[in-house]
Image (cartoon, rainbow, N blue to C red):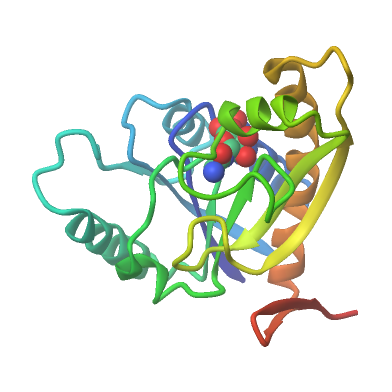
């Protein structure tokens, strides 16, 4: 059984979608840990309500470096024997301390169609604002593996939505989130079934 950790900083709707998918048996994995850098986040509350081990380490005011913080998080994941880390609205750039040991075992969900509208500063509503400003006809969501470049790792799954002429960042975000809630559990299912291989830096999905 694949042991999964979910990292979230905010409301945690993707976290909830992953919990729901687990509950209906979509993937052969167990969410063994919920982690947040924001102790008062909705994600922590959801984890506690679901009786899943939930740990927060406040990043705000943390006395050490980013690397020391990530080393602490790594020790936590290793102590729980976590096989897969899912970033679900985890609003913190990771250091190699955490990325390297979990290379191709750590996924992220991004609210846009990477490689467009990604990189530092492109997260949450900033992505939707940029998509609307650029007058794109399409947006969507991307699940990708986390590598050292921000939003630059191999793409696992994407889902599209049409951008409407009267969309605001909020209305677009709402429709993109629905897609996120479909493709993230599906990516986890593929991982748990051993169907995702990375060959020459690209994802290949096995039948
Ligand atoms: C989601 O839209 C997710 O794609 C985005 O934050 C939101 C979290 O919502 N993540 C990023 O922008 C990361 N670059 P949630 O807390 O309801 O899952």
The percent position of residue 153, horizontal first and vertical second, equals 59, 66
Say how many tags the image has: 0
Ligand 1's image quarter is top right
When the figure is inspected, residue 129 is found, relative to residue 142, above or below; the finding is: above
Picture residue at 64% right of the left edge, 44% below the top: 117
- Residue with the most extreme front position: 134
- Residue with the most extreme bottom position: 200
* Residue 26 appears anywhere in the view: no
For the N terminus, which image quadrant? Answer: bottom right
- Residue 106 or 44: which is nearer the viewer? 106
Give the left or right position of residue 65, taking residue 206 as reference. left
For the C terminus, which image quadrant? Answer: bottom right
- Residue 176 or 40: which is nearer the viewer? 176
Picture residue at 15% right of the left edge, 41% below the top: 62
Give the left or right position of residue 56, taking residue 83 as reference. left
Picture residue at 48% right of the left edge, 36% below the top: 47
């Amino acid at each position: 059984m694949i042991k999964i950790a979910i990292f979230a900083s905010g409301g945690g709707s993707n976290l909830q979608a992953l919990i729901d998918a687990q509950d209906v048996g979509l993937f052969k994995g167990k969410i063994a840990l919920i982690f947040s850098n924001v102790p008062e986040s909705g994600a922590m509350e959801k984890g506690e309500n679901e009786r899943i081990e939930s740990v927060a380490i406040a990043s705000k005011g943390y006395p050490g470096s980013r690397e020391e913080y990530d080393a602490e998080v790594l020790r936590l994941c290793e102590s729980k024997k976590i096989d897969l880390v899912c970033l679900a609205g985890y609003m913190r750039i990771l250091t190699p301390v955490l990325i390297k040991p979990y290379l191709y075992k750590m996924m992220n969900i991004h609210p846009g169609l990477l490689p467009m509208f990604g990189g530092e500063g492109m997260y949450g509503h900033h992505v939707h604002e940029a998509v609307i400003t650029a007058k794109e006809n399409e947006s969507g969501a991307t699940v990708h593996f986390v590598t050292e470049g921000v939003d630059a790792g191999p793409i696992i799954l994407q889902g599209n939505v049409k951008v409407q002429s009267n969309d605001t960042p909020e209305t677009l975000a709402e429709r993109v989130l629905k897609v996120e809630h479909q493709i993230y559990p599906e990516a986890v299912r593929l991982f748990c079934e051993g169907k995702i291989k990375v060959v020459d830096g690209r994802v290949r999905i096995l039948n």
